[in-house]
Image (cartoon, helix red, strand yellow):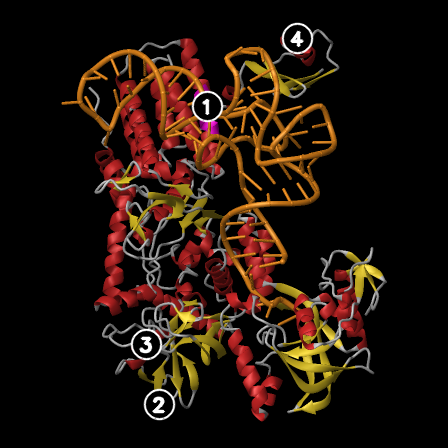
Amino acid sequence: MSARYDAPAIEARWQDAWDRAGLFRAVADPARPKCYVLEMFPYPSGRIHMGHVRNYTMGDVVARHRRATGHAVLHPMGWDAFGLPAENAAMASGGHPKDWTLANIAAMRDQMKPLGFSIDWSREFATCDPAYYGHQQRLFLDMWEAGLVTRKAAVVNWDPVENTVLANEQVVDGRGWRSGAEVERRELTQWFFRISDMAGELLDALDGLEAWPAKVRLMQANWIGRSRGLEMAWPLVEPSHGHETIPVYTTRPDTLLGASFVGISPDHPLARALAAADAGVAAFCEEARKGAATEEAIETAPKLGLDTGLRVRHPLETGRTLPVWIANFILMDYGTGAIFGCPAHDARDLEFARKYGLPVISTFEAEGGNPLPEEGAPAFVPPRTERVRYTRSVAGPEHQTGADAVEAAIARAEVEGWGRGVTRYRLRDWLLSRQRYWGCPIPAIHCPACGTVPVPRDQLPVLLPDDVTFDRPGNPLDRHPTWKHVACPRCGGQAQRETDTMDTFVDSSWYFARFTAPHASTPTDPAEAAYWMNVDQYIGGIEHAILHLLYSRFFARAMVRTGHLPPKAAEPFDALFTQGMVTHEIYQTRDAQGRPVYHFPEEVEDGRLRSTGEAVEIIPSAKMSKSKKNVVDPETIVRRWGADTARWFVLSDSPPERDVEWTAAGAEAAWRHLARVHRLAQEAALSEAPAVPEADAALERALHRTIHEVTQGIESFGFNAAIARLYAFTNLVARSEAGAEAKRRALRIMAQLMAPMTPHLAEEMWSLLGGEGLCAAAPWPVADPAQLIDDTITLPVQVNGKRRGEITVPRDTGPVEIERLAVEAVARSLDGAPPRKVIVVPGRIVNVVA
RNA sequence: GCGGGUGUGGCGGAACCGGCAGACGCACCGGAUUUAGGUUCCGGCGCCGCAAGGCGUGGGGGUUCGAAUCCCCCCACCCGCACCA
């Protein structure tokens, strides 16, 4: 008598067995290849969601497969535990961020463990552990010493209600995301990591990251934004407020003879000097700055300009002078904050020139000619790789590409001494100060006598004080009665601690390194880091394509320079995979005012509300969101169907990089399949059916093909395809006439193939079918190449590319014989005429050309 | 605006290097068994057509013996960046 598939019982039993065997503890073993599998660690919001389940299941598939192929595997888990939500919760309900965070971590760990991930929990840590952030402070000091940290004035987003700076992403339409207050742009002295010093290096190294998605590499490249151009000074006819020239940066020095004005940013030092001296200029600059506040509106914002009355002399056409304008579309923090305007070859300059009646002068045209901007056509801006004809050339031949002309112009400028070629980057330094409590304190002390000095290393960690209140806005560290008052470590005089804490992106920029030696008394342990680094497979969401991954790349380089990581870890993630989201239908009805009312999936049956029978509107494939109520809770799913069903389903329906839609029917189908496999295993375990040579051999051949295909699927992140092969093989086993021994063997090996996805069921089958020890510890099955080749093959036969028949022949049949059989097989479609040509693709197909 | 991606049955998707389009799953339809089951098992299922056959991978063109796959043009949707000189 066979027992039904009782997933909860099976899963608890095997999780316990793995624990006792200590199977997932990562142990460095120089005799074996290592594999470091990492999924982006979670923020402890309080509950795990299906996105976590999918992310960690993918990592677990890789980790379990690599373990089975003989690797020493490191597969850790931790918590990205600092951040604003904890403070918000404290403000809303009066608790302490630490208590809130630790309770959330405990709750999430409890939800995660029943999923059966092969994680080395002995390495778990949270970034809010003093042990972790203390080492982070140490890294900060080392980086400071190495010149990778700086303090400088910067324009930041200041929320006047909350009394803190906000990150750019926390500013929505120019307002604080929570307070709703209009954000001010304030210039404050802040801490920065000097990531822009590494811009070129970080860009060039992208080429080596072959196992990263091209999309992510491209996004990073665009973000870093390298440009090649010319820096040159435009001499003022009359010096003004101490300025004798206006330095300008341009990527199009080849259009210099088309210049018709020089523009400066409202924040340019010269503009500020002029504004200080003239109320009209000051008013204009004020107005121009305001327009730039909301980023989306920039597109439609009109170009505004003010003629300063100043004039500059053209460096090549010295008889010509150009007006100097202050213009709202010129950014102070790119280039020199000043441009020369060439309206014929720049859409923005043209719009500006037409509005203020400035000249438009073409310097090149298409080789076949083109409508001229000076006659009302749009600005002519062809790709730089396109050859054009220069009518007013700075340097080089008449016909050349824009790129060549730029280089020629730079070369001329350098020879003649009126400019120099420069490479610039869009990437700016990483502002790491936050006027927040729940973050890693910046280990610095401000002394009136000695300036800003580091906290001595033997005084680390600088601990967050526990006795803080959140009843008022602003930074509790700043208003704490005693915490910030300390003696200067240099002169012993009265001094103040830095009360800013670090951006939480710092915490997540080196956790992967800490996992290699989570209990070490230094940030990393050289031997452990040398063994485990790099991360062989990193898995996470595309939303981190730029910030987290770029910061981590910077940090790894910084840690190499400061001796905390070996040189090979400069690029810490060898392979990156970005997985898609888990989506779900949204069910909505309308209230009396026509506003949408959302309903949880469990409130809906057959398109109607269970409670009232009202029909619901269904919106397909939306990202799971609590506010839309289109969520399913992993804990509920696991309790109802089991972890294996949840794991199987999130991998089965879509390729891992794409979104997968969670449906109740799909989950049920997954469960049904696993129950069927379980039933087959039980039947095979008890069966005494005698061997059937032909059927046994056929099953064995299919088994080897399945081993081959599933292995390939797993190794290439084709988890959905691997699962499809396992479905097909299950159907085949169920129908097979093979004897009991052959079926037991087939199902035992199938259990191993399923184990990365459904480890508990695999373990249960393994033990039912006489497997030795634990399935999770068994070596991965290897397909016998001889079994992958059939003795006879079936070739489709086409006539003019359309399938018209097939022939089955011994594998070694010669082409002449195949041709004869093929023509015979499709004779009916040839109407008796002899074929004009026959193409035989060995082992694949035959095409008869009629 | 610039850059990138995607488009295959009613649905999710498969198809290696240009070689049988639609694997596998869902939904649906039929049959068997059980008929109190989260049943189970067998079969069918791209479209048109009684059939023979024809048509079919967003649309149009091309290369090829042969195209979902390569090339050109177009359409739709999604993502990233966005006054970066």
Q: Tell me the element at label 1.
A: helix
Q: Between disc 2 and disc 1, whose residue precedes?
A: 2
- Chain label for disc 1: A
Q: Is residue A178 visible?
A: yes
Instruction: Read off the magenta span.
Output: A702-709
Q: Tell me the element at label 4.
A: helix
Single out the mark in the foreground, 2 or 3. Answer: 3
In three-dimensional space, the C-alpha distance between marks 4 and 2, rounded to whole angstroms, equals 104 Å
> Is the same chain shared between marks 1 and 3?
yes
Picture coordinates of residue A783 (x, y %)? Answer: 47, 26
Q: Between disc 1 and disc 3, whose residue precedes?
A: 3
Picture coordinates of residue A824 (x, y %)? Answer: 65, 7
Residue A493 is marked as 2
| Nearer the observer, A601 or A713 | A601
Q: Confirm whether the magenta stretch covers residue A86.
A: no
Q: Tell me the element at label 3.
A: loop
> Is the same chain shared between marks 4 and 2?
yes
